[in-house]
Image: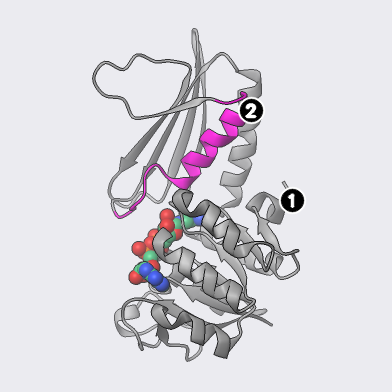
């Protein structure tokens, strides 16, 4: 049995991941952390939306994560919170020898710090997008870019009105993949006023309603264009991938891994 702790347990992703753990015959939820509704049984009252099947686990105060990871000894911590919080959660996991699945985005300012904390002490899967489709999408982008090196590239992403960071981690990874395939490109975020196009990748973020996650990459040449697009229909695309990663990370060597390794891409 793989024992799991979840941070951000009451969030959109955390609650779905707990539901998935409840449905998985080989997994058991042993701790759930958030900064609100402390003490509520997951799955009732104010934490409705958190699944049944989570046993009698209650929402624990994320500020006490160190002590609770020590007493519950999970095999793996799954974190979908916010970047500021994720750094502390990663530190607590490493100090307690707990493997990590980290899905929180907006990590760019903390990337070196997180790498330093993990430093080969525990296995971790860190991915800005855990969906199978998006990981294949990134591969297709690299291939297309290599054939279309003199075409213009624009990335447009759309997410729900509650998303805090922009552009999305998925769009940033798409830009990185394309830039690497083309030997390095400047990134330009949105355009306003006099903004003539240079030899750049343009990135645009749309926020509204309940859009789960759309990513469109436009390769535009003279007289034609190619659009490569991924749309998530439900958050299960990400939650299912995070569960796959949690199983995989149990046997992985220490250090940071990507979802492409989990999926064998
Ligand atoms: N990698 C992926 O595939 C993927 C997919 C979807 C969302 N995300 C990312 O996951 C994160 C969460 O997304 P969401 O839509 O579930 O957000 P959300 O706002 O619904 O949930 C975040 C939860 O974290 C809690 N939280 C805040 N600080 C905390 C702390 N210190 N310790 C524990 N919990 C804390 C909040 O109270 C909230 O319940 C975001 O960064 C989002 O971009 C990643």
Q: Which residue is rendered at x = 57% and y = 30% of the image?
A: 178
Q: Position of residue 238 (x, y in %)?
A: 52, 57
Residue 180 highlighted magenta (yes or no): yes
Q: Is mark 2 within 8 Å of ligand 1?
A: no
Query: Which quadrant of the figure shows ligand 1?
Result: bottom left
Q: Disc 1 versus disc 2: distance between alpha carbons?
A: 20 Å
User: For the view shown, which residue lies furthest in the left direction?
Assistant: 193
Q: Which residue is mark 2?
A: 181
The magenta span reads 162-184
- Please tell me how crowded label 1 is: few (under 14), some (14-19), or many (20+) other residues with Cα within 10 Å: few
Q: Which residue is rendered at x = 74% and y = 51% of the image?
A: 264
Could you say whether the residue bearing mark 1 is in a helix, strand or loop?
loop
Q: Which mark is residue 162?
A: none
Q: Position of residue 64 (x, y in %)?
A: 43, 83
Q: Is residue 37 left or right of residue 58?
A: left
Could you say whether the residue bearing mark 2 is in a helix, strand or loop?
helix
Q: Is residue 69 visible?
A: yes
Number of numbered markers = 2
Q: Is residue 43 left or right of residue 127?
A: left
Image position of 16 with respect to 140: above or below: below
Q: Position of residue 107 (x, y in %)?
A: 47, 53
Which comes before the other along the chain, label 1 or label 2? 2
């Amino acid at each position: 049995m793989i024992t799991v702790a979840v941070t951000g347990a009451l969030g959109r992703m955390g609650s779905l991941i707990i539901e998935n753990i409840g449905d998985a015959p080989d997994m058991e939820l042993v701790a759930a952390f958030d900064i609100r509704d402390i003490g509520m049984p997951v799955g009732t009252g104010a934490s409705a939306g958190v699944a049944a099947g989570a046993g009698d686990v209650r929402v624990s105060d994320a500020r006490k994560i160190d002590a609770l990871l020590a007493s519950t000894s999970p095999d793996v911590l799954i974190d979908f919170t916010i970047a500021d919080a994720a750094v502390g959660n990663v530190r607590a996991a490493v100090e307690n020898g707990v493997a990590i699945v980290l899905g929180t985005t907006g990590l760019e300012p903390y990337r070196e710090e997180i790498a330093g904390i993990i430093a080969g002490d525990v296995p971790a899967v860190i991915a800005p997008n855990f969906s199978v489709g998006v990981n294949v999408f990134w591969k297709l982008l690299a291939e297309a870019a290599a054939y279309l090196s003199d075409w213009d590239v624009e990335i447009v992403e759309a997410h729900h009105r509650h998303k805090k960071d922009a552009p999305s981690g998925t769009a940033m990874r798409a830009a990185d993949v394309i830039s690497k395939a083309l030997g390095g490109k400047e990134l330009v975020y949105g355009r306003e006023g006099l903004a003539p196009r240079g030899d750049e990748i343009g990135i645009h973020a749309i926020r509204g309603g309940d859009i789960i996650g759309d990513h469109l990459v436009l390769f535009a040449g003279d007289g034609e264009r190619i659009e490569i697009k991924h749309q998530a229909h439900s958050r299960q695309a990400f939650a299912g991938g995070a569960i796959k990663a949690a199983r995989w990370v149990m046997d992985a060597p220490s250090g940071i891994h990507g979802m492409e390794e989990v999926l064998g891409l």
